[in-house]
Amino acid sequence: MRAKLIVMQAAAFDNWYEARVVTPSSPSAAGLALLQSKGCLLCHTTTGKPLVGPSYKGIYGTKVTVMVKGHEEVKTVDEKYLKFMITHPKVWVVKGYPPIMPKTPLTDKEVDEIIAYIKTLK
């Protein structure tokens, strides 16, 4: 196996490293960081391809069918819907998916940042 080693002064390394670290500078960037750190992207994607849960890509503004107490309801994916689904993951379950989403402790600000990011995925 081959590897490339680059040797540099400590100050140059620090500058290089700082340039590579992603610091959330907007609510949507913070939302992506939260999805990654909270493990959401283990079951959901941002690419349009569903996994265990639906993909976030292009979902905002669409209509989805959810199971509510054994019957189907059609809901519009808006901020209110996303906030409810994130904070009460077992009350409504998207049809075709198992009811396994865990309740993840999030602040209201964190939920808003996740929603801001989801809204950017067109």
Image (cartoon, rainbow, N blue to C red):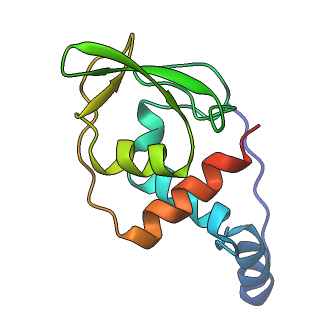
Q: Position of residue 100 (x, y in %)?
A: 24, 27
Q: Nearer the viewer, residue 35 or 16?
A: 35
Which quarter of the figure has residue 96? top left
Q: Position of residue 62 (x, y in %)?
A: 64, 29
Q: Residue at left 44%, top 60%?
A: 111
Image quarter hosting the N terminus: top right
Q: Nearer the viewer, residue 52 or 60?
A: 60
Q: Residue at left 81%, top 83%?
A: 12
Which quarter of the figure has residue 22? bottom right
Asked if 45 appears above or below 65 in the picture, the reply is: below
Q: Is residue 53 visible?
A: yes
Asked if 68 appears above or below 11 in the picture, the reply is: above
Q: Position of residue 2 (x, y in %)?
A: 73, 36
Q: Residue at left 42%, top 30%?
A: 43
Q: Is residue 32 visible?
A: no
Q: Position of residue 15 (x, y in %)?
A: 78, 82
Q: Nearer the viewer, residue 12 or 18?
A: 18
Asked if 40 appears above or below 96 in the picture, the reply is: below
Which quarter of the figure has residue 49? top right
Q: Residue at left 63%, top 69%?
A: 27
Residue situated furthest bottom in the rendering: 11
Image quarter hosting the C terminus: top right
